[in-house]
Amino acid sequence: MIKNKTLYEFMEYLPFLKELIKRDFKMKYYKSFFGVLWTVLNPLIMAFILTIIFSTLFKRSIEYYPIYNISGHLILTFFVTATKQSLTSVYFHSSVFRKFKVPQYMYCLSNVIIAFITLLFSSIPMLVLAFILNVPLHLTMLLFPLPILLALIFTLGCSLILAAYGVFFRDLYHLYGILTYALNFFTPIFYPIDIIPVEYRFVWDFNPLYLYIRILRETFIYNTVPNEKTLIVATCYAVLTLALGILVFKEKRGKFYNYL
């Protein structure tokens, strides 16, 4: 009964979510000269800069280094952008919730979806680079959407949790900024995992983003099908985090009005 009620609520406000996405997407590039083109230029520029800086160190040990770099940058940027914006999505729109009966999670969903659309547009440079660098075409490239979908599910779960707790702990935004900065170093974006001593790699293994990036690189660049254990762990991270996010948000939403 509860599930049906939740589904009914979501379907009822689906048109609102669509309009919200359209509005936020337009506002994101309002008065921007390049507009949506920035979603393509940004990963190219970042990959170019990081490749120049680190290619002398890692180019020999990492095949197709520019694509290796940009693939990690895409998923990490998507996660950080979506979660940071979702963290403030509820209390930033508290005036709306007091006047209109709107599910609070709609703003969180909008942030995640817009970040995901940006990720899809940003994937274009990676495809172009693969063509320029003559990356061989292979069937495992068809698995390219899998790690992106898992990253989306995982990110949505984290976003719901952060959106809920962001209402009660306003300092969480500043703390989370430090944590996301640390993620740049605890996720192998520009360096190979081989440089980490074996006894410390368990720290990286607990990072779900590392799994999604690794699967993306294996399937798209290195013509490798991820092993069964990796896929199971990556899927469990995504599904369990989403389930936890839904439960946390449901449990906390009744208390929002006391803090907004």
Image (spheres, rainbow, N blue to C red):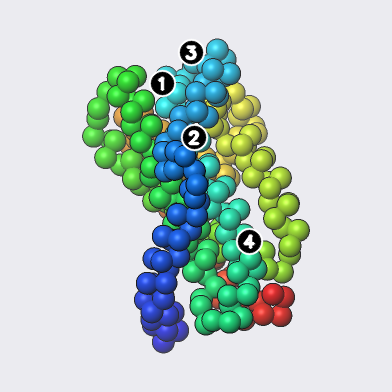
Q: Pointers 3 and 4 in contact (CB under 8 A)?
A: no
**Alpha-carbon distance for marks 1 and 4?**
38 Å
Closer to us: 120 or 69: 120
What kind of residue is marked 2? Answer: Asn
Q: Disc 4 designates what residue?
A: 88
**Alpha-carbon distance for marks 3 and 2?**
25 Å
Q: Pointers 1 and 4 in contact (CB under 8 A)?
A: no
Crowd rating for badge 3 (residues with CA inside 10 Å; few <14, some 14–19, many 20+): few
Name the N-terminal-most of marks 2 and 1. Answer: 2
Q: Disc 3 designates what residue?
A: 60
Q: Pointers 2 and 1 in contact (CB under 8 A)?
A: no
**Alpha-carbon distance for marks 2 and 1?**
19 Å
Q: Disc 2 designates what residue?
A: 42
**In the figure, residue 18 lies in which quadrant?**
bottom left
**In the figure, residue 90 lies in which quadrant?**
bottom right
Name the N-terminal-most of marks 3 and 4. Answer: 3
Report helix, strand or loop for mark 2.
Answer: helix
**Alpha-carbon distance for marks 3 and 4?**
42 Å
What kind of residue is marked 1? Answer: Tyr
Q: Disc 1 designates what residue?
A: 64
**Alpha-carbon distance for marks 2 and 4?**
24 Å
Crowd rating for badge 1 (residues with CA inside 10 Å; few <14, some 14–19, many 20+): some
| Residue 77 placement (x, y as % from top left) | 53, 42
Instruction: For marks 1 and 3, give the one nearer the viewer.
Output: 1
Name the N-terminal-most of marks 2 and 4. Answer: 2
What kind of residue is marked 3? Answer: Arg
Whether residue 236 is visible: no
Q: Quadrant of the C terminus?
A: bottom right
Instruction: For marks 1 and 4, give the one nearer the viewer.
Output: 4
